[in-house]
């Protein structure tokens, strides 16, 4: 008897699973906002490669389209694109872009290549690129790490039927590269008193790639030493992809296992003070550091060491 009950429970599981995964029904006669690459409108990372194009459908003909933005402390930046006073951000309220009735809002999106304005009335479909809208509004503004922005798309047709979808964008800061003992990354004279040459990489989005490239024109001895420490005898030091690098720069550059997927790494260029005795004469040795995180965000910084 117990076995029979167990079999009945197991047989019921797939049915329960299917019910739990059942998609929301869409009324073909009412407005609908669809995001093909993010069907469930889950939170997405704001990156260059993000596809944030949404399709707006209204079989009953479009009458009104509004975007309600919540950009936190950046809400006031939206006001310059709003003519209708009641839609502007005031006292913590979220600004509203009226894409049909507000000429200023329509001009913003029109300048980004999106069809908006009163010409939308009576249409059955159009598309919006939400990433382009955010990038235009936030351009040139510093954005704090771990910030979330939202855009609610509200559509009303000529029968007063509506649909509203909330798009959520998370922002993780790109990797940062700093040199505590040389804040402005000024050229280092290897013949002068030694300074600490530890360069720090911080990556809130977790390190995915970390490379150091010795640029052309370096001292031949430096070039040779770098090539001898890379698998393919090249001047590109791949700290994650090249297994030989860990031994070649042991004590100065961390091993792959210590940085891959981590949020911090320290590169010590102090070995150049030892190498300077093998340099043949005056030279300028430039290294380009490239840090990439798991979101595909990249930061590049040069460090320069000269020998007189």
Image: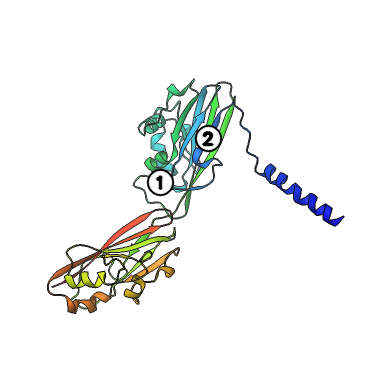
- From the viewer's side, name the closer residue of 61 and 105: 61
> Pointer 1: what residue?
49
- Which residue is located at x 37 percent, y 40 percent? 136
- From the viewer's side, name the closer residue of 70 and 288: 288
Residue 268 percent location from the top left of the image: 31, 72
The reply to whether residue 41 is visible in this rendering is: yes
Q: How is the image coloured?
A: rainbow
Residue 118 percent location from the top left of the image: 44, 22
The reply to whether residue 191 is visible in this rendering is: no
In this picture, residue 88 sits left or right of residue 199: right
> Pointer 2: what residue?
34
- Which residue is located at x 54 percent, y 45 percent? 42
Give the numbered dot on residue 14.
none
Residue 276 percent location from the top left of the image: 19, 76
**Circles 2 and 1 in contact, beta carbons < 8 Å:** no
Measured in 3D between alpha carbons, the distance from the residue under mark 2 to the one under mark 1, in whole angstroms, is 19 Å
In this picture, residue 295 sits left or right of residue 57: left
Q: Residues within 10 Å of mark 1 (few under 14, many from 20)?
A: few
- From the viewer's side, name the closer residue of 116 and 238: 238
Residue that extends furthest to the right in the rendered view of this protein: 1
Q: Please, is residue 223 above or below residue 24 in the view?
A: below
Assign a secondary structure to mark 2.
strand
Q: Considering only order in the chain, which callout, 1 or 2, is on the residue closer to the N terminus?
A: 2
Q: Please, is residue 308 above or below residue 120 in the view?
A: below
- Which residue is located at x 26 percent, y 67 percent? 233
């Amino acid at each position: 008897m117990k076995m029979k009950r167990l079999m009945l429970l197991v047989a019921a599981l797939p049915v329960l699973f299917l019910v739990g995964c059942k998609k929301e029904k869409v009324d073909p006669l009412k407005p609908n906002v669809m995001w093909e690459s993010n069907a469930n409108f889950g939170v997405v990372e704001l990156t260059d490669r993000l596809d944030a194009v949404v399709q707006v459908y209204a079989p009953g003909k479009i009458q009104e389209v509004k975007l309600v933005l919540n950009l936190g402390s950046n809400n006031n930046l939206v006001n310059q694109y709003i003519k209708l006073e009641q839609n502007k951000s005031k006292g913590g309220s979220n600004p509203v872009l009226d894409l049909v009735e507000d000429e200023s809002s329509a001009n913003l999106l029109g300048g980004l290549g999106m069809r908006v304005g009163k010409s939308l009335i009576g249409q059955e479909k159009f598309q919006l690129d939400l990433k382009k809208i955010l990038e235009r509004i936030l351009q040139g503004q510093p954005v704090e790490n771990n910030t979330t922005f939202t855009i609610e798309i509200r559509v009303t047709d000529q029968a007063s039927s509506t649909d509203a979808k909330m798009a959520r964008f998370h922002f993780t800061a790109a990797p940062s590269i700093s040199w505590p003992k040389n804040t402005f990354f000024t050229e280092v004279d290897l013949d002068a008193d030694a300074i600490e040459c530890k360069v720090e990489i911080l990556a809130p989005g977790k390190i995915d790639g970390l490379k150091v490239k010795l640029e052309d024109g370096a001292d031949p001895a430096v070039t040779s030493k770098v090539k001898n420490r890379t698998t393919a005898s090249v001047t590109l030091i791949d700290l994650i992809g090249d297994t030989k690098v860990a031994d070649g720069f042991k004590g100065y550059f961390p091993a792959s296992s210590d940085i891959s997927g981590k949020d911090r790494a320290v590169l010590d260029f102090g070995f150049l003070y030892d190498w300077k005795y093998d340099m043949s004469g005056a030279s300028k040795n430039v290294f380009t550091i490239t840090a990439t995180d798991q979101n595909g965000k990249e930061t590049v910084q040069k460090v320069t060491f000269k020998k007189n």
